[in-house]
Amino acid sequence: MFTCNSYIAQDAKKFKKQYKNFLAQVKKFKKIAVFRHIKPDFDALGTQFGLATWLKDNFKDKDIKVLGDNHIAFTPRGLFPETDKVNDEWFNDEFLAIIVDVGDKKRIADPRFQKATYKFKLDHHPVTDNIFDDEITDTSKAAAAEEVCSMLLSFKKYPLSAEASKYFYIGLVGDSGRFQYSSTSPLSFEVAKCLLERNINIVKIYESMYQDDLSKLEVIKFILNNYKISEHGVAYYVMTQKDLDTLHLASEQGKDNVNFFSTYQGINIWCSITEDITEPCFRISIRSRNFVINEVAKKYKGGGHASASGAQIKDLTELDQFIKDLDQVVIDNTK
């Protein structure tokens, strides 16, 4: 007996028009492609595969595709299946594009979303583009998985399977910081409760998400030997390409330990700064406890949430000013 109620019901009332249109578009199109952002995280992949699984379970006559490169760390660990390899001809017919967990169109992993007959976005980042035919964007949500799952749970005629629930739970846990970030809300826990009612194995999920082999101790050792903390409690570590090679990490794995600093008193904002030679640039993941950091992120070609954002700098000559800008956030909000 599933007993999901109040907060999900409030969402259903708030987004009644969009929910109705989403279901109408899903029913309308024979072909549906689910997109997410480049360099995906738990939420992007969890939401993408959760939604695709729900679609396949309930609309068996549809041709459902999951687009974007396989993640170098998540896919081999068995957390998610491989994405679909789709040739250009598939996109010549009419199709519905559902874009999840993307605030900026430039970060959509496969540019062929632009060929879609209808584009529907489901997200929790601040809106930066108005190129979609319809969207549900709620920045109060802890995760895109929470946003999408809340909607699907309100569709009583279309059940959510254990497999889909597993993927959504991964996304929700990942982007809520295991339910520790300030964006975590009663809705977050209500959605989690509904997912648990579908008999997902949370012990196995957490092991798959967070359990590492002993080689990862070398990464922790590197962080301990190289981290810095500014005068006002901005902690960070820098990984150059040489460091990544030594540690046998891909560039997108450099941010995996950004929350290493999250439990220490005196640290107000913390960052991972990782070289990406494909751009080239240094990509920055920024987190905070009680300080709004997304305005600084915007200044450095990024953006995101109040306490979890991304940015980039061209090279390390910009690093000192970047840290000073984060220091200023702390100064301005502790007077």
Image (spheres, grey):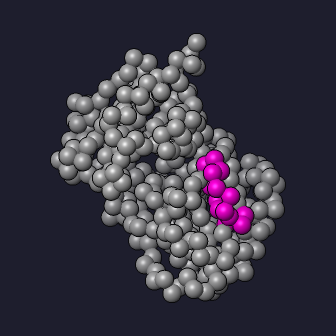
> Is residue 125 depicted above or below 237 in this figure?
below
- Seen at 40% across and 41% down, the residue is 313
Question: Closest to the observer: 8 or 71?
Answer: 71
Counting from the top left corner in percent of width and height, residue 57 is at: 60, 76
Expressed as whole percent of the image width and height from the top left, the position of residue 165 reads 56, 62
Image side of residue 260 versus residue 300, left or right? left
Q: Any magenta on residue 59?
A: no
Query: Position of 57 compared to 277: left or right?
Result: right
Residue 196 position, x and y percent, is 57, 55
Please tell me which residue lies in front, 201 or 190: 190
Q: Residue at the spot x=63%, y=80% of the render?
A: 95
Using the image, determine if residue 115 lies above or below residue 135: below
User: Is residue 129 visible to us here?
Assistant: yes
Q: Which secondary structure class fits the magenta region best?
A: loop
203 sits left or right of 112 in the view: left
| Residue at the top extreme of this rendering | 335
Q: Quadrant of residue 31?
A: bottom right
Which residue is depicted at the point 42% across and 21% down? 233
Q: Residue at x 59, y 53 (%)?
A: 103
Asked whether residue 58 is in view, the answer is: no
Please report the bounds of the magenta region as a residue range: 120-134
Q: Position of residue 327 (x, y in %)?
A: 46, 23
Front residue of 300/26: it is 300
Q: Is residue 124 magenta?
A: yes
Q: Considering only vertical position in the picture, is 246 above or below 180?
A: below
Locate the C terminus by quadrant. top right
